[in-house]
Amino acid sequence: MKKARSILVALLVISVLFVAGCTSSKPAPKPEDPNSNVNNPNNNTEDPNSNVVTEPKISVEFVSAELLKDKKEYYYFSETDPSENIIFTSDIEVQNFRFIAVVYVETENTFKLQEEKLLYAHGTLVPKKPLVISTSFPGTIPNRGIAYTDANNVDHYFALSLSGEDGSVLLIAFENFT
């Protein structure tokens, strides 16, 4: 019995030493800084030695009439039955910025978003002069969105949706098909 207890204690000590030896004395790596230039898909800086152009960071949020009074300059578009003001900003110039109607279309037993029609063609969205759109969000299926053309002449599409968590406005990327 003493021998079994001694072996059990010895195994316990070896296990503790083994586990302690497996841990690193180095501190855990810090999460990547979102403002870092390394592997950040929302980084808008261009490498002067590269032909790669990174994507703009487009933001959207609700904005009240009181907050709009503080804005010196912004573009404005209103639909016929507006109920909410949303503001679009970009960290770099965005060409061919459009406000669009989107629909769900069934294709091959799946549903996909598709641009239905153009509601407003803005032209160039610039960082210092945001775009405010007065619109509504009826139902739970996205029916409005935005599109823009990047520096490589590729169109990008996003549906406007409301977060089920906090009610904020979200941009949901989709591939438009025709």
Image: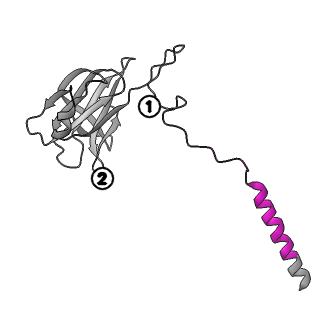
Would residue 29 be seen by someone viewing this image from the given angle? yes
The residue lying at 73 percent from left, 50 percent from top is 25
Within 10 angstroms of label 2, few (less than 14), some, or many (20 or more) residues? few
Please state which of residues 27 and 168 is positioned toward the viewer in this rendering: 27
Helix, strand or loop at disc 2? loop
Residue 106 versus residue 56 in the image, above or below: below
User: Does 78 sit left or right of 103 as displayed?
Assistant: left
Residue for badge 2: 164
- Real-space Cα distance between discs 1 and 2? 24 Å
Q: Is residue 8 above or below residue 69?
A: below
Q: How is the image coloured?
A: one colour
Return the x and y of residue 174 as percentages of the image width and height.
34, 35
Where does residue 89 sit, x and y in percent of width and height? 30, 30
Which mark, by number, is residue 100? none
Q: Residue furthest right?
A: 3
Residue at 51%, 18% in the rendered image: 47
Q: Which quadrant holds residue 131? A: top left
State the residue lying farthest toward the left: 80
Residue most toward the bottom?
A: 1
Q: Amino acid at mark 2?
A: Gly
Q: Position of residue 139 (x, y in %)?
A: 19, 49
> Which residues, given as a range, are shown in magenta?
7-32
Element carrying mark 1? loop
Q: Label 1: which residue?
A: 42
Between 136 and 90, the one nearer to me in the picture: 90
Question: Quadrant where the C terminus lies?
Answer: top left
Dot 1 or dot 2, earlier in sequence: 1
Type of amino acid under label 1: Asn
User: What is the magenta segment's predominant secondary structure?
Assistant: helix
